[in-house]
Image (cartoon, rainbow, N blue to C red):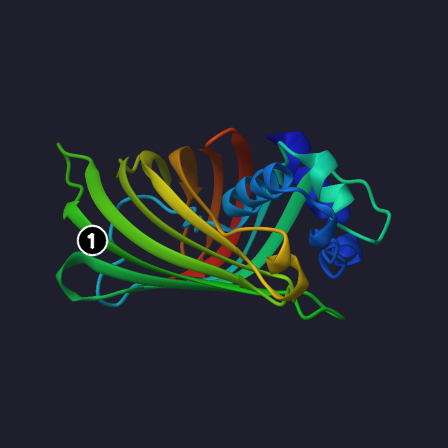
Amino acid sequence: MKKWIIAVLLNLSAISSWAADLDGLGDLNQAEFEGLSRDLTAAFSYKAVAPAEPLGIAGLDVGLSVSVTQLEYAEVWNKATSSGDAIDTLIVPKLYLQKGLPLDFDIGVYFFTLPDSELEAWGLELKYALIDANAAMPAVAIRGAYTTLLGVDELKITTRSIDFSISKSISILTPYAGIGLVWGSSKPLEAAALTLSTFDVTETKVFLGVSYTPSFFNLALELEKVGANASYSLKVGIAI
């Protein structure tokens, strides 16, 4: 985990070099396009980086998160870009907000954009606590989420996901884990649509993490596996 956090901090300033250059989809065959789509689905599918406990009607968590996703098809990514950069991970920084609602519901959103690039992504989640934690019971929640990646002229990607999570607070630490499914849809556009077909994929999702929440502060670390892709996420925010 430590090396991934260091990688995030060292490489955030360089991510625009690859993000704006995903413009060589027409050079891919269908199998390569499907591999690229699996990597992007894993990288941009919704990552709440949060335990199962509801925030409560007055609760609010807002801040920054960064996810690092290991590419399973790095050679395809490098073929699909014109920048000449060879990478084997995708770094996705996001602004996020999670708000508590009545009846143990939470809603969350994230937004991602890169300077000097048209690449954008946004996501939306709705979580319901089936069981709220108490002295004897852990919290159990179900979450549904949707994301979309925009700004790539030749490609549109959307994901949908559903997961169940469980967590139990131990003082200011809250370990959690979960399992679910991710559905991704990659649609080639413009010239790429002449040689490539839309690809839909369903992947299993498993994750575990821990949230550290002293007064008015939230730090969370999470490991997630979507299909064959591993992602490491760091979230820092203000929680009330």
Q: Residue at x 74, y 58 (%)?
A: 23
Q: Residue at x 62, y 58 (%)?
A: 194
Snapshot quadrant of residue 59:
bottom left
Point out residue 107 in the picture as x, y percentages from the top left corner: 30, 63
For the residue pair 176 and 76, the one nearer the viewer reads as 76
Question: What residue sits right under mark 1 in the picture?
Answer: 128
Q: How many marks?
A: 1
Circle 1: is it few (<14), some (14-19), or many (20+) Cα within 10 Å? many
Image height of 164 relative to 122, above or below? above
For the residue pair 187 and 69, the one nearer the viewer reads as 187
Quarter of the picture containing the N terminus is top right
On the question of residue 60 being in view, the answer is: no
Most distant residue in the front direction: 194
Point out residue 205 in the picture as x, y percentages from the top left corner: 39, 35
Query: In the displayed structure, does residue 55 sit left or right of residue 192?
Result: left
Query: Which type of secondary structure does the marked residue at label 1 adopt?
Result: strand
For the residue pair 20 and 68, the one nearer the viewer reads as 20
For the residue pair 182 and 239, the one nearer the viewer reads as 182
The three-letter amino acid code for the residue at tag 1 is: Tyr
Point out residue 134 in the picture as x, y percentages from the top left corner: 15, 40
Most distant residue in the right direction: 84
On the question of residue 143 being in view, the answer is: yes
Point out residue 240 in the picture as x, y percentages from the top left corner: 36, 62
